[in-house]
Amino acid sequence: MSMTDPIADLLTRIRNANLARKEQVDVPWSRLKEAIVRVATEEGFFKEYRVVEVGGHPTLRIWLKYDASNRPVISGLKRISRPSLRVYAGADEIPLIQRGLGISIVSTPQGVMVDREARRRRAGGEVLCSIW
C-alpha cells in the first residue's frame, strides 16, 4: 500500500522518536526525504544520517541530537505544504519561523534548501516543512 504523504510520515517518525528519547530512527528512503534530512543536519538539528540497506530496501537512518540535559534539540516540526494544499512562496514571501530561530525547508528549482539560502539566492518554491 502506498503512502499519501511520505514527508508527513518522516516528520511524525522523527517527532515520536524525539519524544521517546530514541538515539536513532529509521524511515523508508527517498531522494526528497534525504534532501530534507541533509538540510536539517547541516543546520544542526540531527547528529548525522546515513542510507543503509534493511531487508533489501534502502532506509534512511537518522541519529537524533539532544542537549546536555537530555532534552531534544528539535522542539517542533510542522508540515506546511501538503498533497491536498500546496504552499508556494516567492523569495520575499518565505515565512520566518520563531523569529529566525527555526528554519523552513523549501524545494526550489535550484534544489532543496533552507529558507535563508533561498532568500539569498532569490529563489522561491514550495515550502515543505518547518523545524524549530
Image: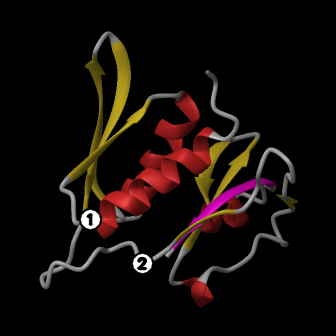
Image position, residue 34 (x, y; %): 47, 37
Mark found first going from the N terminus, 1 or 2: 1
- Residue located beneath label 2 in the image: 75
Region of the chain picked out in magenta, as a range: 125-131
* Marker disc for residue 131: none
Which residue corresponds to mark 1? 20
Farthest residue to the top: give it.
56
**Magenta region includes residue 126:** yes
The residue located at (54%, 29%) in the rendering is: 31
Q: Quadrant of residue 28?
A: top left
- Is residue 45 visible from the viewing direction of this image? yes
Amino acid bearing label 2? Ser
Q: Secondary structure at mark 2?
A: loop
Percent x, y of residue 65? 24, 65
Q: Which residue lies most toward the bottom here?
A: 99
Q: How is the image coloured?
A: secondary structure
Is 83 situated above or below 28?
below
Q: Residues within 10 Å of mark 1 (few under 14, many from 20)?
A: few
Q: Is residue 130 left or right of residue 23?
A: right
State the count of labels: 2
Residue 63 at x, y percent in the picture: 24, 51
Answer above or below: position of 2 versus 118.
Answer: above
Which image quadrant is residue 14 in?
Answer: bottom left
Circles 1 and 2 in contact, beta carbons < 8 Å: no
Q: Residues within 10 Å of mark 2 (few under 14, many from 20)?
A: few
Mark nearest the camera among 1 and 2 is 1
The amino acid sitting under disc 1 is Ala
The majority secondary structure of the magenta stretch comes to: strand
